[in-house]
Amino acid sequence: MSDKYKFKIVFIGDGYVGKTSLIRKFTQKSFEKQYIKTIGAQFSFYDTQVENQDVRSIFYDIAGQDKFNFMRKMFFKDSKAAVIVYSLVDDKMGKESFNNIKTWYDDVLKFCGSIPIAVIANKVDLTYENVVDIIDIKEVIKEKEFLGYYVTSAKTGQGVKKAFNSIIEGVYYKN
């Protein structure tokens, strides 16, 4: 496969938002009920076609805990896109994960420059109402000109395939 259609896409966001589960749901169609902390980073491959061209996406799942900050620059290197994941769960961690979108965005700019960035709101299955007002979400998305905004559930699969396919296509067309 030519390097022209090989894209490294980093998944970032606070710990416990479901980055690993989203990637596993999309690439392996499975969901692990028990939380498994990412140490440093993990990566997965996904092969598909866009406009009759073979495309390989390499998903880098980067640990969200602060103690891994020192490793991030290395994992961001050569990324063609980033996906910021936050949790819709109505608790302190869910709200903080939304508030930290801007921090993650700034990290992408610092380590990668101007690359496409998408946002995924995960764990929709665990909430009846969105924690963050839809107006707040729209303001953040508009302000930062994100590639897209997707609502998903890694557990049920809701929105996962659409989000990943849209992100892969968006990266393809921007490169």
Image: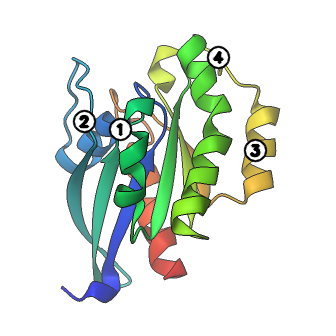
Nearest the camera: 128 or 33? Answer: 33
The residue that mark 1 highlights is 63
- Any part of residue 6 in sight: yes
Indicate the amino acid at tag 1. Answer: Ala
The residue that mark 2 highlights is 39
Which circle, 2 or 4, is nearer the viewer?
2
Indicate the amino acid at tag 2. Answer: Ile
Per the model, the C-alpha gap separating discs 1 and 4 is 27 Å
Q: Is residue 39 above or below residue 54?
A: above
The residue that mark 3 highlights is 140
Query: Is mark 3 in CB contact (under 8 Å) with mark 2?
Result: no
Which circle, 1 or 3, is nearer the viewer?
1
Q: Earlier in the sequence, mark 4 or mark 3?
A: 4
Per the model, the C-alpha gap separating discs 3 and 2 is 29 Å
Q: Is residue 57 above or below residue 13?
A: below
Which element is circle 1 on? loop
